[in-house]
Image (cartoon, rainbow, N blue to C red):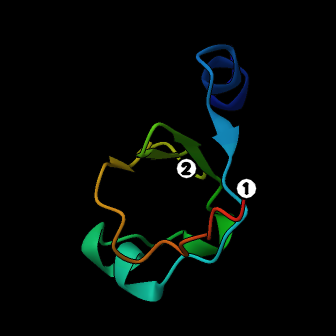
Amino acid sequence: MKCKEKLKEEGYIRYRGAVDASVYEYFNCDCSWKAEWYLKAGHYRCCGCKERCETREPDGFQLFLDLG
């Protein structure tokens, strides 16, 4: 099963906000152009390459205001 499909089944949604370059520097990522981040309850996971990076640290991820 593909990573994206598995994450969606686990309740993750595609993260469409901006990701700062510092996140990719932290993970020493050589494939930032392929990154596809998913989010679930403050847990970020990437399916861009075979490394499958993940973090709970929100630093570097664009925050959204809850206006509701």
Q: Residues within 10 Å of mark 1 (few under 14, many from 20)?
A: few
Report the quarter where the N terminus lies: top right
Q: In terms of depth relative to the viewer, which is nearer, 3 or 68?
A: 68
Count of numbered labels shown in the rendering: 2
> Residue 17: where, in percent of width, then height?
67, 70
Give left or right: position of 28 versus 52: left
* Vertical arrangement, residue 55 with respect to residue 6, above or below: below
Q: Crowding at label 2, few (<14), some or many (≥20) Cα neighbours within 10 Å?
A: some
Residue at left 61%, top 25%? 7
Residue at label 2? 49
Q: Position of residue 33 (x, y in %)?
A: 65, 74
Q: Secondary structure at mark 1?
A: loop
Quadrant placement of the C terminus: bottom right
Task: Report the residue at 28% width, 59% height from top.
Answer: 57
Which quarter of the figure has residue 9? top right
Mark 2 lies on a secondary structure that is: loop
| Quadrant of the image occupied by residue 66 | bottom right
| Residue reaching furthest to the front | 68
Residue 26: percent from left, percent from top: 26, 73
